Image: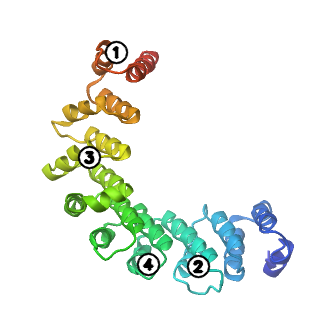
């Protein structure tokens, strides 16, 4: 069957009806066309529509098909090729969506494009964030050195990009990231105290790397006393997933933390590490607060129900 592409543009109301209505009409095309024809229609729309919101809607519709021509179009959008959109904010949003969708292909040939955008300091930070995240999700360790450089770079102005690069390093799981991440925790406390979210991501990444290392242990130990509850919780989780002999004793300290969520996470971590005994201990000893006792009882009830 010959496809009337221009007729589809007209029938779907592109340029004459609201974006929501147009997207619904485009989505309904799957009732009338097979997968091969649908892909051709989507690619035609991506090449001929210049309304960012509609493009984003079409991109989401392509998600389940993973077509190579579609991938090529998305890469062009990310690299600002073959696209003419004047509104800068809409263009940025479109490129962020493209980066996320491209990463879903898990195609390692796209790593170079992501690195190009990530390493361009003149690029918008939202696009760089999306590219760093994409590199972590694709899982190609060729990106490790560039991500480490972003995290270490004294001249990198965007802490959000550093945060995203740190998260990607955790996903990639390359142990060469340990030294630079530890060094940042040791050397930049003033900066990290001001922007605790970066510290949170560093601890999370170190936990995902999951390797016994004295320097990492020191960082995790110090992080249990950090001013940010999320940093303390991340440190507890990292210790729980490690093989450090000191983990249980270190986490026990957090059962007396001032923040209930930290105490709660410490209790759950210890329950995973040493079992039912810690729950009985918390319930029986007066030194533990009532909130934590209730949490311990809830875990016991859940445990007994499973039995």
According to the image, label 1 marks what residue?
A: 283
Q: Is residue 162 left or right of residue 46?
A: left
> In this picture, is 177 found above or below 292?
below
Q: Secondary structure at mark 2?
A: helix
Question: Residue 223: which numbered mark, if any?
Answer: 3
> Does label 3 or label 4 sit earlier along the sequence?
4
> Does label 2 or label 3 sit earlier along the sequence?
2
> Does label 4 or label 1 sit earlier along the sequence?
4
> Does label 1 or label 2 sit earlier along the sequence?
2
**Are the residues flagged by discs 3 and 4 in contact, CB closer than 8 Å?**
no
The residue at 25%/58% (across/down) is 189
> In this picture, is 46 found above or below 283?
below
Q: Nearer the observer, disc 2 or disc 3?
A: 3
* Label 1 environment density (alpha carbons within 10 Å; few <14, some 14–19, many ≥20): some
> Does label 1 or label 3 sit earlier along the sequence?
3
Give the image location of residue 89, x and y in percent. Answer: 61, 75
Give the image location of residue 114, x and y in percent. Answer: 43, 75
The residue sitting at the left extreme is: 214
* Label 2 environment density (alpha carbons within 10 Å; few <14, some 14–19, many ≥20): some
Quick one: 31 or 123, which is closer to the camera?
123
According to the image, label 4 marks what residue?
A: 117
Measure the alpha-carbon separation of dots 4 and 1: 54 Å
Decide if residue 171 is in sight here.
no
């Amino acid at each position: 069957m010959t496809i009337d592409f221009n007729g589809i543009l007209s029938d779907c109301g592109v340029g004459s009806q609201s974006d929501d209505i147009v997207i619904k009409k485009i989505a309904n095309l799957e009732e009338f066309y097979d997968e091969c024809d649908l892909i051709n229609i989507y690619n035609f729309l991506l090449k001929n529509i210049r309304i960012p919101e509609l493009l984003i809607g079409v991109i989401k519709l392509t998600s389940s098909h993973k077509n190579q021509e579609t991938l090529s179009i998305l890469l062009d959008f990310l690299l600002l090729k073959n696209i003419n959109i004047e509104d800068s904010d809409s263009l940025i949003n479109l490129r962020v969506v493209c980066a996320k969708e491209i990463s879903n292909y898990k195609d390692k040939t796209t790593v170079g494009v992501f690195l190009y955008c990530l390493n361009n300091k003149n690029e918008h930070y939202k696009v760089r964030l999306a590219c760093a995240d994409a590199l972590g999700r694709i899982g190609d360790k060729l990106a490790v050195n560039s991500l480490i450089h972003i995290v270490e770079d004294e001249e990198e102005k965007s802490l959000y990009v550093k945060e995203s690069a740190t998260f990607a390093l955790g996903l990639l799981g390359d142990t060469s990231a340990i030294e630079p991440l530890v060094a940042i925790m040791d050397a930049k406390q003033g900066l990290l105290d001001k922007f605790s979210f970066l510290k949170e991501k560093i601890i999370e990444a170190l936990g995902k790397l999951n390797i016994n290392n004295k320097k990492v242990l020191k960082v995790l130990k110090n992080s249990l006393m950090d001013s940010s509850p999320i940093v303390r919780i991340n440190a507890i989780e990292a210790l729980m997933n490690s093989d450090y002999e000191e983990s249980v004793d270190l986490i026990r300290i957090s059962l007396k933390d001032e923040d209930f969520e930290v105490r709660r996470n410490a209790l759950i971590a210890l329950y995973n590490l040493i079992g039912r005994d810690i729950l009985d201990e918390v319930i029986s000893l007066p030194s533990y607060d009532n909130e934590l006792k209730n949490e311990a009882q809830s875990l016991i009830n859940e445990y007994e129900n499973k039995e």
